[in-house]
Image (tube, rainbow, N blue to C red):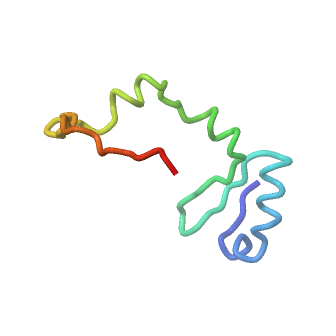
Amino acid sequence: MDWRMKDAETRIGEIIDRALSEGPQTILREGEAVVVVKAADYSRLVPQPSFKEHLLNGPSFEGLDLERDKSSPREVDFEF
């Protein structure tokens, strides 16, 4: 169903209810449209990267110091 912005402002609860029960709802504002859909439907429409792709496309660790501290550990007294 299509909604005008003026109606959507006052009936957002109904729009969400209809999106959940009937399917996508379109809100129009000055010739532009947005669509309200269930999160599960959105997830199916937008491709999700695999875990491998997620890791490979993450931030670069170049220049990050990953050297292990080689100093001796502190002494711990286990006696009470």
**Foreground of the two, 33 or 9:** 9
Answer left or right for 10 relative to 59. right
Q: Is residue 52 left or right of residue 62?
A: right
User: At 77% across and 61% down in the image, what residue appears?
Assistant: 15
Residue at screen point 84% across, 47% down: 22
Instruction: List x then y, in percent, for residue 61.
Output: 23, 36
Which residue extends farthest right?
21
Q: In this view, does 66 lie to the left or right of 52?
A: left
From this view, report whether residue 58 is shown above or below residue 17.
above
Name which quarter of the figure residue 8 lies in.
bottom right
Measuring from the top left, give residue 64's x and y in whole percent: 18, 40
Eyeballing the image, is 28 above or below 10?
above
Q: Position of residue 12 (x, y in %)?
A: 75, 68
Furthest toward the front, the residue is: 80
Quadrant location of the N terminus in the rendered image: bottom right
Q: Residue at x 38, y 29 (%)?
A: 55
Q: Quadrant of residue 52?
A: top left
Q: Is residue 10 above or below residue 43?
A: below
Viewer-side residue, 36 vs 54:
54
Identify the residue at image location x=69%, y=38%: 41
